[in-house]
Image (spheres, helix red, strand yellow):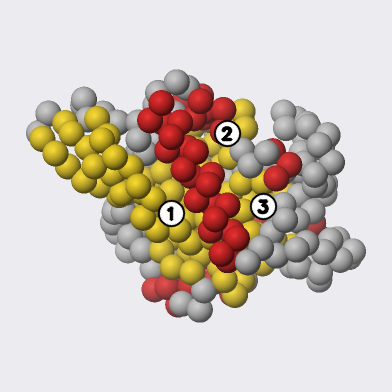
Amino acid sequence: MQISQHGNSLIVTFVVGIALVGCSPHEKGSGAGSSMSTAGSGSDLDSSNSPAPATATMSLAAAEAKARGILQRQIDATKAHDGSMKTMFTPDAVVFTHDKATTVDGVTFFGLADGGPDGVQTDKATIAKVLAGGNANVVWFYAEVATESTGPDGKGTGTTRVVEVATAAEQWRVVAASFGEAGELAPAGDNREIENATAADGPLAKLLGAPDLVGAQLAANAIVVGPKAATQGARSRDTLASWKLEPMNVYKRAREMRTATWGFAQANLDHHDKKYTDRLAGMIVAVPEADGRWSVVLAQYVGQ
């Protein structure tokens, strides 16, 4: 996934990986989950006739508590300025930030308590809102972090929007992420393929590029995150449809990973308007159903 800026807009999305057996460089052998596969690896879960493994669902309250704990540790780490923030991601995690989508070692600014460009210093960062879900193996969430800062032009405030997915097998480290502010979609420069791309034809990659199909496969408590709004639950399908994102396509290839109990896809996207092409960063998180279908639990479409 790529992070781009619409004016002052910055978007971040996180995903943390679980039990990545046989999937370098995540090979942990932790026994906490099942092996992860990348698109094109020959292990598409949606084509299997066997039922998905039973996985205990977290209550929304438990998922929110887990999400708040993960995010607060990240805020504390960025405030410390000691490099510990980057240890909270897996080495191949792709992070959308204010100016690019990159692996975590290339991130220069998260927008939490780590200050900002042009000499801006963050004085305070507070978790203001969390929408979350999860099961025994994974937690996904959207959050808003309110910041107060001091810079060359004086005092200021802002809100960093965070989307993350974290998993137990990676000790709740992040495998994919996005940090940014709300902003309108707008045409941008040339698009580019996301880093660590896997394949163009994985089941989740194909779903990501078709927002109308995503809407049809949203779970009951799904979270949707758009350029300016985010919601969870009964209104999610209508909210996603209201953004009118079709027609859309994944630019070249996506980054897709799947396990027996969860999966995600990230990509840079092209949204074709009447006269212009908007560039978007997109991600979906999904869990497999017993009949082999993927149920989307989080969908994010934001401007670059």
Q: Position of residue 162 (x, y in %)?
A: 43, 48
Of 275 and 286, nearer the camera is 286
Q: Which residue is mark 1?
A: 143
Q: Is residue 160 above or below residue 80?
A: below
Q: Report the residue that reaches farthest toward the top.
A: 82
**Residue flagged by tag 2: what amino acid is it?**
Phe
The answer to whether any part of residue 85 appears in the image is yes
**Residue flagged by tag 1: what amino acid is it?**
Ala
Of 15 and 84, nearer the camera is 84
Q: Which residue is mark 3?
A: 138
Question: Which residue is drawn at the image coordinates 58% and 52% (left, top)?
Answer: 66
From the viewer's perspective, tell me whether residue 232 is left or right of residue 213: left
Question: Which residue is drawn at the image coordinates 54% and 44% (left, top)?
Answer: 70
Q: Which residue is mark 2?
A: 89
Disc 2 from disc 1: Cα separation? 17 Å
From the viewer's perspective, tell me whether residue 34 is left or right of residue 277: right
